[in-house]
């Protein structure tokens, strides 16, 4: 997915589209040819919003490799993802229509990592998707390193944009 929005929320926190990331590590990787370059970001866990009681962090980590909360900000208040989807919330006991003014967010409540690469990067290859996810999750678990990920990326064939 392309990045359409970037914002600095705090000295250590950025917003990439809807993703709030408390940056723990960042690496600009240029280990091979220009088309093999990418950026690696590792985020520390964010504080929970308090909107959800039943989020099972362990279950999310088992399924996805990380845990997160989806919510929205409406006029300075946090609302649930369900309220965002419905387009309304309850304030002071009254139903309020948000009229598309709520801003969707995703907050990671466990360590999370991602890669930013150009559209033509060999990383953006569906045959590498599963391996990429496995490597990123293994980095989070401390079972492998960024260097191992770089070695695997360098093995990928150059892609054609035509």
Image (cartoon, grey):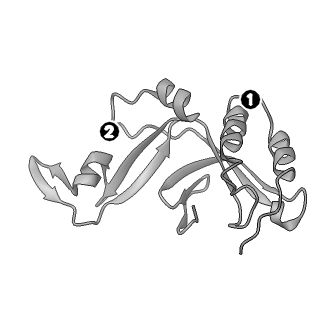
As drawn, the label of residue 142 is 1
Residue at x 50%, y 37% (from the top left corner) = 109
Residue at x 9%, y 51% (from the top left corner) = 94
Task: Using the rendered image of the protein, determine whether residue 80 is visible from the camera's viewpoint.
Answer: no
Q: How many numbered marks appear?
A: 2
Q: Depth check: 76 or 74 in front? A: 74
Which quadrant: the N terminus?
bottom right
Residue farthest toward the left in the current orientation of the protein: 94
The mark that comes first in sequence, 2 or 1, is: 2
Neighbour class for label 1 at 10 Å: few (<14), some, many (≥20)?
few
Expressed as whole percent of the image width and height from the top left, the position of residue 79 reads 29, 49
The answer to whether 75 appears left or right of 123 in the picture is left
Element type where label 1 sits in the image: loop
Q: Depth check: 20 or 132 in front? A: 132
Element type where label 2 sits in the image: loop
Q: Is residue 86 above or below residue 45?
A: below
As drawn, the label of residue 59 is none
Check disc 2 and report the residue beneath it. 51
The answer to whether 114 appears left or right of 80 in the picture is right
Residue at x 84%, y 40% (from the top left corner) = 148
The answer to whether 54 appears left or right of 116 in the picture is left
In whole angstroms, how far apart are the C-alphas of marks 2 and 1? 30 Å
Residue farthest toward the bottom in the current orientation of the protein: 162
Residue farthest toward the right in the current orientation of the protein: 32
The image quarter containing residue 8 is bottom right
Which quadrant: the C terminus?
bottom right
Expressed as whole percent of the image width and height from the top left, the position of residue 145 reads 80, 37
Residue at x 11%, y 53% (from the top left corner) = 95
The image quarter containing residue 124 is bottom right
Q: Is residue 142 above or below residue 76?
A: above
The answer to whether 116 appears left or right of 47 in the picture is right
Q: Depth check: 44 or 104 in front? A: 104
């Amino acid at each position: 997915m392309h990045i359409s929005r970037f914002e600095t929320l705090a000295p250590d926190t950025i917003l990439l589209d809807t993703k709030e990331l408390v940056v723990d590590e960042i690496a600009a990787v240029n280990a091979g040819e220009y088309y093999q370059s990418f950026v690696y970001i590792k985020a520390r866990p964010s504080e929970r919003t308090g909107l959800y009681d039943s989020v099972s962090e362990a279950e999310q980590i088992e399924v996805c490799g990380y845990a997160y909360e989806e919510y929205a900000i409406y006029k300075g208040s946090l609302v649930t993802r369900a309220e965002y989807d419905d387009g309304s919330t309850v304030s002071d006991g009254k139903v309020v229509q948000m009229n598309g003014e709520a801003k969707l967010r995703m907050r990671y409540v466990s360590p999370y990592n991602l890669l930013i690469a150009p559209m033509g990067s060999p990383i953006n290859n569906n045959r590498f998707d599963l391996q990429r996810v496995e490597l990123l999750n293994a980095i989070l678990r401390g079972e492998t390193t960024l260097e191992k990920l770089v070695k695997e990326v360098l093995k990928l064939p150059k892609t054609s944009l035509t």
